[in-house]
Amino acid sequence: MNDRTSDGDRAAQNWRPATRLIRGGTHRSPHGETSEALFMTSGYVYDSPEAAEARFKGEETGFIYSRYANPTVAMFEERMALLEGAEAGRATASGMAAVNAALLSQVRAGDHVVASRALFGSCLYIVEDLLPRFGVETTLVDGTDLDQWRRAVRPETVAAFIETPSNPMLEIIDIPAVAEIVHSVGARLVVDNVFATPMLQRPLALGADVVVYSATKHIDGQGRALGGIILASEEFCETHLKSFLRHTGPAISPFNAWLMLKGLETLDLRVARHCQNAARVAAFLKGHKGVARVLYAGDPDHPQADLAARQMSAGGTMVAIEVTGGKAGAFAFLDRLGLIDISNNLGDAKSLVTHPATTTHQRLTPEERARLGISDGLVRLSVGLEDAEDLIEDLDQALGG
Ligand SMILES: *Cc1c(COP(=O)(O)O)cnc(C)c1O
């Protein structure tokens, strides 16, 4: 490995995001390959037993085992940290492994965690079911209501967890305001930034302490691989994540990290096109007679349009559509779609629709779904990279023209 010189590090700090996405973290091997090398190896060899001893003692730098670190994975981590403006990053095998590690690595029995209620199903499982099993109390709040945050935090609170925009109702949580409340009791704010992507919202700059991504979504962006990443201070990564990740083993495959590196090269272009398409699709749907309501974070009629405009640079890639006719209406609409696929994934080049009430949010009781606004007629659309006119034609015919 050609380790980057400190001059190189300083240059990278000055690059603009599009350059960071393409060149950040690249460490070329002595072969001088153009594209990032894929180090598909589980282990590393040592020149001598003394060298192995020194590396284990931490007296000599170098790789030990790919559950700890791997050169291709390290390139992905460095590129993401540069992009996010974080001191450090640690990649994981999936987005859920990232959420789990970001939360579990920093809590112990007796601690308290606050989270917004509008969470991705598996995130809700970690906060609501898993943490309490180990003596960590959790409080769920309506993330958009700052008074509920003020009442929920207490001296034992160590972490708060939010997603914004939320899945699937695209609610916006005020990151700086929640960060201030959370910091007032000395706790950390963890933001799941999947829906906004690193291109549209910068939680660390807005006051958050830890950012997590499912790289499976826009970062790969082409439906190929699972992955996740945690971005935070060097201190958080060393104190909390390092031992947790090394010894519990949610390591990403070097192959998947390599796919993510290649995905990042086009993230800026893809997210810009996703957003253009989503804005056009949302504008078309708003006037449609088969549609009761459309939610899009970039729409001036979104209930929190001002807040969205303050903390996001564009409206994002997701549109929530309430069709008329409840579950039957939603299913008939999904059945009639010819181009857009039914899938629970998102952030893909292909446009994908899902019916949250019967899939991603099926585990919730009808009362809990009602509380979150997830009706039987709600459809979540992840707008892809196809021609927007083709998407609009497909949606129009599926809604009965
Ligand atoms: C998909 C998703 C996750 C989980 O990521 P995986 O890579 O599927 O494990 C977490 N949070 C949000 C908001 C997601 O959309």
Image: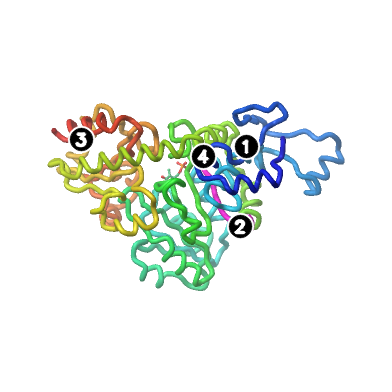
Return the disc, 3 or 4, that comes first in the chain's sequence: 4
SS of the residue at dot 2? helix
Residue type (three-letter) at the residue carrying disc 2: Phe
Q: Residue 13 shows which numbered tag?
A: none
SS of the residue at dot 3? helix
Q: Residue at x 19, y 32 (%)?
A: 398
Which marked residue is nearer to the observer: mark 4 or mark 1? 1
Whether tag 2 and tag 1 are in contact, CB under 8 A, the answer is: no
Return the disc, 2 or 1, that comes first in the chain's sequence: 1
Residue type (three-letter) at the residue carrying disc 4: Gly
| 130 within the magenta span | no
Q: Which residue is mark 4?
A: 227
Scheme of image coloration? rainbow
Q: Residue at x 36, y 38 (%)?
A: 274
Q: Is mark 4 within 8 Å of ligand 1?
A: yes
Which residue occupies the foreground of this view, 177 or 192? Answer: 177
Q: Which residue is mark 3?
A: 333
Give me the C-alpha separation between circle 2 and circle 3.
46 Å
Which residue occupies the foreground of this view, 253 or 291? Answer: 291
Give me the C-alpha separation between circle 3 and circle 4.
32 Å
* Quarter of the C terminus within the rendering: top left
Residue type (three-letter) at the residue carrying disc 1: Thr
Q: Residue 26 shows which numbered tag?
A: 1
Q: Which residue is mark 2?
A: 236
Give me the C-alpha separation between circle 2 and circle 1.
24 Å
Start and end of the magenta stretch? 227-236
Crowding around mark 4 (Cα neighbors within 10 Å: few <14, some 14 to 19, many 20+) is many
Give me the C-alpha separation between circle 4 and circle 1.
19 Å
Give me the C-alpha separation between circle 3 and circle 1.
45 Å
